[in-house]
Amino acid sequence: MAGEEEKGSCGCQVCPGSIEVPTEREMAALAELRAIKERVRVLKGSLDSIREEGVGDRSHRVEEIEATLDTLKAEWERWDEERKDAAQERMRLLGHEETV
């Protein structure tokens, strides 16, 4: 349905009362952001534990966790952009911003 304009029962683009706030698209993005945040929290805890132990050669595990954190950062940025786009779409549908 991307790119398609929704029509309300009265013929308007979308009746303001028919839009849930936040929208499903926003809620999906927020859920992904929360999941990423939790994964980062767990990984950073593991990283702190490994560094505190200081026993043996753990550099491989540290590098692995840091690479995963980098991947999660990129994923976070993508989902945050999706959240912003969804919020902007909602504002357009509600008539608070002009359609581009």
Image (spheres, rainbow, N blue to C red):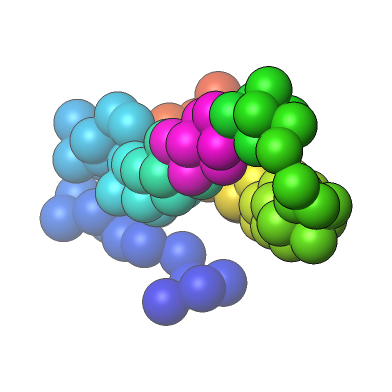
Query: From the viewer's perspective, is 100 left or right of 12?
Result: right
Say whether residue 86 is magenta: no
Tell me where the magenta segment starts and ends, as one range.
38-47
Residue 47 seen from this side: no
Q: Residue furthest bottom?
A: 1
Please identify the quarter of the rendering in which residue 71 is found: bottom right
Which SS does the magenta portion mostly show?
helix
Picture coordinates of residue 44, whole percent (x, y): 62, 32
Say whether residue 40 is magenta: yes
- Nearest the viewer among 99 and 38 is 38
Query: From the viewer's perspective, is 20 left or right of 28?
Result: left
Query: From the viewer's perspective, is 33 left or right of 14?
Result: right
- Nearest the viewer among 66 and 25 is 66
Query: From the viewer's perspective, is 56 left or right of 30?
Result: right
Q: Residue furthest front?
A: 56
Picture coordinates of residue 100, whole percent (x, y): 76, 50
Residue pictured at 42% horizontal, 77% vertical: 1
Picture coordinates of residue 6, whole percent (x, y): 36, 62
Residue 39 seen from this side: yes
